[in-house]
Amino acid sequence: MASIGQWLRPALTVPKTSWSAGESNWKVSPKTLFVLILGLWLFGTGEAFLIDASIGQSPWTVLADGLAKTLNMSIGETTFLTSIVVLLFWIPLKRRPGLGTVMNILVIATAIDVMTPLLPTPTNIVAQTVEALFGILLVGVASALYITCNVGAGPRDGLMTGLNEKTGIRVGRVRTGIEIVVLTIGWLLGGVVGIGTLLFALLIGQSVAIAFGLVERISPQTS
């Protein structure tokens, strides 16, 4: 029987699972579609936990907040604008969008709007920190679920996996580096940064890498 340490061993790259799609980024089985939607919904829920914890949001939301203040736009509008800009970086990385890319924008946004009013909003710093940490864990697991569907990652995760494949740098380290850069730009533009933001930037890379390892062990791709 595998030890806890073996189960929590992070993956070095994106694994293949029993729900991973084949060559097409658009044709999916019912199982793949279910895992895709589940992963995206959990991702939005994880973001909602961070929002309701009220001690700092994820770096990409900090960037959207900073851009919104600078450009006099809503955070939703700047989030969409950021997604388009990130997609342009896919070109030199030779990444192709797919069903997952489109649904990333739709499902995550809906989940955030639906779940934020339903989740607790603690005022005690200990409870707020616990809620933020749970949100980070949930985002990591959600990322591993929907990325391994192999039907086109979201704009930001496609950048992460593309850089991983192009450079050979571990996926966790790539994700952490991206989050730190985005956080810095958002902060310089006036986005709100807190303890939760710092925790997300430092922990999300390892959270995703460990979750990749877990899904690979739980549901490996069969021949």
Image (spheres, grey):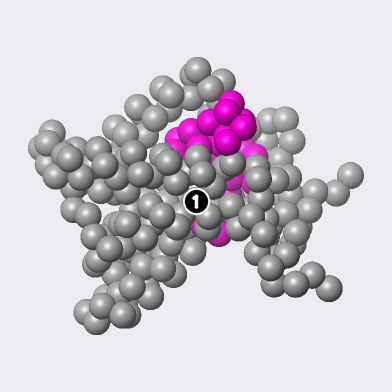
Circle 1 SS class: helix
Q: Residue at x 69, y 68 (%)?
A: 5
Q: What stretch is highlighted in magenta?
A: 140-169
For the residue pair 160 and 206, the one nearer the viewer reads as 206
Foreground: 141 or 184? 184
Characterize the local packing of mark 1: few (<14), some (14-19) or many (20 or more) Cα atoms within 10 angstroms: many
Residue 130: give x, y in percent of width and height. Answer: 38, 75
Q: Quadrant of the C terminus?
A: top right
Q: Is the magenta stretch mostly helix, strand or loop?
A: helix
Q: Measured along the vertical axis of the image, is residue 42 above or below residue 27?
A: below
What is the x, y in percent for residue 101? 50, 37
152 versus 205 height, above or below: above
Q: Which residue is depicted at the point 45% across and 35% down? A: 155
* In magenta stretch: residue 142: yes
Disc 1: which residue: 205
Position above or below: 135 against 92:
below
The spot of residue 135 in percent (x, y) is 42, 65
Position of the N terminus, as image quadrant, is: bottom right
- Look at label 1 and name its amino acid: Gly
**Side of 1 where 3 appears, left or right:** left
Q: Which residue lies furthest to the top in this view?
A: 92
